[in-house]
Amino acid sequence: MNSMPYEFKALEGILVNVCLSLEKDFSSLEPTILENLDDLPTKLTSRQLEELRSFKQRLSQFSARSQEVQRVIQEILEEDENMINMYLTEKSTFPKHRRNLVEHEEIEILSESYLQIIDHLTNRAELLDNAIDDTEDLVTIRLDTIRNRILFVELTLNILGLAFAAGGLVAGIFGMNLGIPIFKEENGSSFYFFVCVFLILCSIMSLYWWLFKWCKEKGLYSS
């Protein structure tokens, strides 16, 4: 590589520095993000969710940087005139010499080799971003499941409350100062009391079952 012109060595130095910087940034992100993604489905905490959002933002910034470098190199490779004009040493040594537009193999090989490195880093960042999106979808599904369970418990308690309220209404009616002949019979009040309690409980259970079935038919609850 000692035969390379000075401008090519300078360009390669710049590309090496850019690639090393991108690789260093990505290496600091990837292991931590993968560890967070592995732990998140089983250890769902608000702190980990905030960390994941922060990592995703940093990953987006990295992707923007790598894509910008990728775009610049691609623009150079797409324009033959740009690559010809990069032979500065030759232009200064032989100012009257004009290269053919297709005679830029050295700079083309140099640019393409580092473009492959940038492409590799960009693709890895994209895969990692997709993994974050998939994990977020999984977390959303899990949170929806937990929310549905909470709603089911709340709905069950509301149904039970309504059923017992209906039973309390019946008990309230019997508890009023009304004369009920059956309770005036000797040795008969206890029997009729237990009969009334049994009927009230049956009414509560029937009402609960009917409300529960109605909620399932209306789609308010799904097992």
Image (cartoon, grey):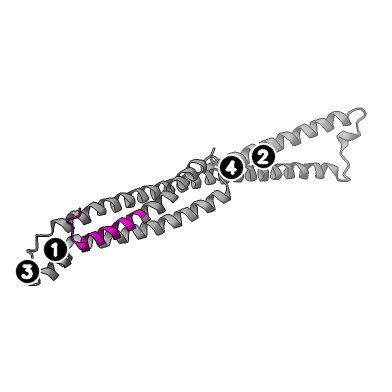
The residue indicated by pointer 3 is 97
Tell me how far mark 4 sits from mark 2, CA to CA.
Answer: 22 Å
> What's drawn in magenta, residue-wise?
1-20
Relative image position of residue 149 (x, y in whole percent): 59, 42
**Which residue is more in the foreground, 169 or 104?**
104
The residue indicated by pointer 2 is 207
The residue indicated by pointer 1 is 80
Amino acid type, residue under disc 1 in the picture: Asp
Mark 3 or 4, closer to the camera: 3
Residue 33 highlighted magenta (yes or no): no
Tell me how far mark 3 sits from mark 4, CA to CA.
Answer: 79 Å
- Other-residue count near label 4 (Cα within 10 Å), few / some / many at <14 / 14–19 / ≥20: some
Indicate left or right for 129 with 148 as reference: left
Report the quarter where the C terminus lies: top right
Residue at far right of view: 186
Contact (Cβ within 8 Å) of mark 1 with mark 2: no
Mark 4 or 1, closer to the camera: 1
Amino acid type, residue under disc 2 in the picture: Leu
The residue indicated by pointer 4 is 149
Relative image position of residue 162 (x, y in whole percent): 69, 45
**Which residue is more in the foreground, 196 or 158?**
158
Q: Is residue 219 visible?
A: no
Amino acid type, residue under disc 4 in the picture: Arg
